[in-house]
Amino acid sequence: MKDVGNVKSADYFQINHEIRRMLAEKGVILLPSPEAYEKMEWTREHFGQKPVEGYFIWVKKQVSYPISTCIAISSPEVYQKPRNLVIVEKGVKAEVYSICNAVKPNLSGKHVGYSKIILRENSTLKIRHFHKWGRTDEVSSVLDFLLEKGATAFSFYKSLAPPEKLTVENRTVLDAYSSANFETSVLAKNGEVKLYDSIFLNGEKSSGIVKLRMVSGENSKILSHSKIVAEKAGRGHVDCMGLLLSENSSIDSIPELLNSNKNAVLTHEASIGKVSEEELNYLRSRGLTEDEAINLIVTGFLGEALTYREYPIPAESHM
Amino acid sequence: MLKVENLSVRVQGRDILKGVSLKIGKGEVHVLLGPNASGKSTFAYTLMGFPEYKVTQGKILFEGKEITHMPIEERAKLGIALAFQHPVAVKGVTLSRLLKRISKQPLDLNGFPLDKSLLDREINVGFSGGERKLSEILQIISLNPVFVILDEFDAGLDIVNLEKLTLIIQDKLLRNGVSLLLITHRGNILQFLEPDVAHVMLGGEMVCSSRNWRKTWRTILRYGYERCRECKERGLLSD
């Protein structure tokens, strides 16, 4: 994949309920979900119910650049219900940058998103999903991944400015030789975040990894429930790490491993604690204040790979 | 530069330092010798201002200003820097990111026995003894300090790398007039760096301060640290 800059193979940009931009190069079909539902009957079983908004992206051939999507709220009390469908065809490798955000901090919007992502045989999808919301928004996002034989999914989700109530759910079904790698980084502050992951190893030699990095700041609560179910001889791992930054913050982390195949291996590791005094004092001895030291540790903990500004998203949807 | 007067320090309810005094001038190199658990590291952490090291008596003056109860980061901003004997691992933060955050001067990496991949690793996570020392010295130099404490810098370093790092210390710190306090119990670093003054600490007391460091060190090598205590009584190692 090349540098995303302004070059995209497909670009979908929606503000409130209006599509502002929708472009796709050859090899990618990009339609509003309601239109895809009407025109392509076969998509209906995947959409479930008739969508009112959202995008349909069908990556039929190898593309040179990433696909970019953005669904933003810019007016007060908007209630978005996007239903998205992404399909990557056999053997194709694709990369998606996806952002959902509120343009201002106090719009009291509601965003209830549902996405289904289907990876055909031996295809690969790398998806980077970024949320940035205002305090008064209410957000829930569900992603259903369906991985066919030999498919590979990497999903990175990051939310550094969650609303008062945020729920994110990933459900993944894996066929033989497919693999899913999910990384979620969340910073909660004055609110409640719920993270649900479930991975179903339904095919031989399938593998699934859930990696959670959670930081619970002032007056906040994070609940994570990560489940891996092995029916076939696959491998699964849950890795949860949490940092508590305040006396009135909490993290409740529940790993669940259900193994019904003696040749499957499921493991988990978890730790939740505070930033140690030793680390803080060490960084303070380098001239950083306590707050600066905590900030450095927290941003490092949540992953340095990508920040909000580095996302190839429309400038007009920045807060 | 640094003046410590009659300093007593308590750590977790135990009195560790008992009435320690010391004076370091600008550009001077002092070595603090002493066996394990004699209070040397406690002295270093107290100079840096670590909160669990409670000063119960005496004071610390830095460039004429009293810093006895000053927070760690403010001391760092004044130009005091400490290379830790056992630096803590900071998960998630790469060395390059920390250097970028704290650097007060551009870092010239020429001459450092450095595998550049070290910069992309999380600070002190899985670092070897030598890598830790290198990371410490990189951080210290980037802070552009005026007074540096090297706590057991020669422990965990092979002789070749100790010599290399000592050359860097001479080039990047001493040549710029930085004052140095070397803390060591084995004294290996003295092969490469000659101090102006040697101090000996035993049981939390400074039992000797001498400009004739070679005599002090020879006595310790020949008779062990305990001789210094007797010596104090006899006044053999005084100036």
Image (spheres, coloured by chain):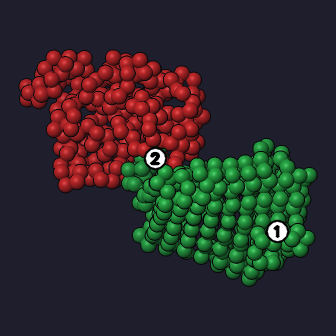
Chain colours: A green, B red
**Residue B84's x, y, as percent?**
37, 38
Amino acid bearing label 2: Val
Q: Categorize mark 1 by other alpha carbons within 10 Å: few (<14), some (14-19), many (20+).
A: some
Q: Is residue B183 left or right of residue A21?
A: left
Amino acid bearing label 1: Thr
Q: Give the chain of mark 2.
A: B
**Location of the N terminus of chain A (image quadrant):** top right
Q: Residue at x 89, y 74 (%)?
A: A38
Element carrying mark 2: strand
**Residue A134's x, y, as percent?**
66, 73
Element carrying mark 1: helix
Determine whether A188 is above or below A286 in the image. Answer: below
Q: Give the chain of mark 1.
A: A
Q: Which residue is mark 2?
A: B90
Question: Does the image show residue A124?
Answer: no
Q: Which residue is mark 1?
A: A43
Q: Residue at x 71, y 71 (%)?
A: A114
Q: Residue at x 48, y 48 (%)?
A: B91
**Residue B115's x, y, as percent?**
54, 27
**Location of the C terminus of chain A (image quadrant):** bottom right
Q: Nearer the viewer, residue B115 or A226?
A: A226
Determine whether A26 is above or below B169 in the image. Answer: below
